[in-house]
Amino acid sequence: MTSEPDETAAAPEPAPAPSDPDGVLRLLDVEAEPPGAYGELEPATPPLIDGQGRVRLSFSRIDTYQNCPRRFRYAYVDRLPTVPGPALSFGSSIHAALEAFYDRKLPDRPSEDDLLGWLYEAWDSTGFEELPRDEQLSYYRHAQDVLRRYHRRVGDAYRLPATTEAWFELPIGFEAVVVGSIDRVDVDDDGRFHVIDYKTNRKVKDRARVAGSLQLAIYALACRHLFGSLPATVCLDFVVPGVEVRVPVEELDLEAARTAILDVAASIREERYEPTPNRLCDWCDHRAVCPAWPEDGAESLGEAVEELRRRRRQVARDVRALRELEAGVTRLATEVQDAERS
Ligand code: SF4
């Protein structure tokens, strides 16, 4: 692998700053000699071990690890790039529209047009960029249909939730912390909580699988952490087929969920990243570098390196643009100060 030229080296240095004790003129701290390749602008993702020495997990990280520890390593330790697909963008667009639908502070159900408008505003096209325009459009129309049906299904039962996208950081002993957000928490007339998670896959899970969902167990524990009591029910709302599967919290095995989280945290701490071939290998972004599939060759490593170069170039361009902007603002501020003095 050839080493990358340091493109930040050619970036102009900012002009000397005028007196600015409160730092209001400083748009962004960019070190003259950054400690990392790109100083403060080095792309950041949450660290694997937090400041308190706990393994920082999310449901998605746990799920990835349980599915294949090597895939987890590629994604969260090596941080190899992944390609967002249509399913991811479709799901995040639907989630964002539904969040807006419930996030109003008025008791009346927003109109179908409002809901479709929020879909328009929230539409995430990143996963569709490789597709021809008519396919992109058909995804968009499908999302509109899904939300129209959702709007009809909710009907007059619409009520304001206790919260949407409730962010949590749930400590599990001293070993792990699980972070995430709950799509929606409802509160009923008796003050009991109900956790709802939207799913955008086509297939509905049966009741037993919903009760066994680690994600819902985490959300139930998070609900207690945030609001002081477990929810009365947890629910997966499969918005594409329009089916809600709800189970009472008593059917969840919360202790088993805690044990599973701690097991994953311990394995990550021990750096156990064995490849585990499974039915999702065909969709794995890292298959070509995975030792479980040696016949796939190292072509994708080349893709990963190319992506790394592309991102480095982009970051370097951004650093240059910010430094130029910062230098411009600094110059103008100096001129303003000189004008005030004269
Ligand atoms: S290709 Fe399969 S075995 Fe290899 S990292 Fe991906 S999911 Fe794991």
Image: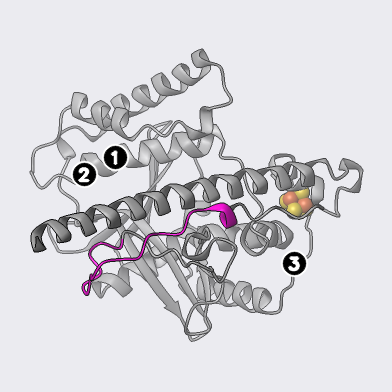
> How dense is the environment of label 3, judged by Cα within 10 Å: few (below 14), some, or many (20 and up)?
some
Extent of the magenta region: 8-26
Name the residue that disc number 1 marks: 98
Residue 239's place in the image compared with 144, above or below, is below
Q: Are marks 2 and 1 in contact (CB under 8 Å)?
A: yes
The residue at 16%/28% (across/down) is 111
Instruction: Return the residue nearer the eye: 327 or 158.
Output: 327
* In this view, the mark in front (3 or 2): 3
Name the residue that disc number 3 marks: 273
- Amino acid type shown at disc 1: Leu
Residue 160 visible in the current orientation: yes
Q: Is residue 10 magenta?
A: yes
Instruction: Return the residue nearer the eye: 338 or 123.
Output: 338
- Amino acid type shown at disc 3: Tyr
Instruction: Return the residue nearer the eye: 10 or 7.
Output: 10
Question: Which is more N-terminal, label 1 or label 3?
Answer: 1
- Determine which quarter of the picture holds residue 74: bottom right
The residue at 50%/13% (across/down) is 134
Q: Secondary structure at mark 1?
A: helix
Q: Secondary structure at mark 3?
A: loop
Instruction: Please state the horizontal and vertical placement of residue 127, each as a whole percent of the image.
Output: 52, 33
Q: How many labels were placed on the picture?
A: 3
Question: Which is more N-terminal, label 2 or label 3?
Answer: 2
Residue 265's place in the image compared with 136, above or below, is below
Q: Are marks 3 and 1 in contact (CB under 8 Å)?
A: no
Name the residue that disc number 2 marks: 102
- Answer yes or no: disc 2 within 8 Å of ligand 1: no
Q: Along the horizontal axis of the image, is 244 left or right of 18?
A: right
* In this view, the mark in front (3 or 1): 3
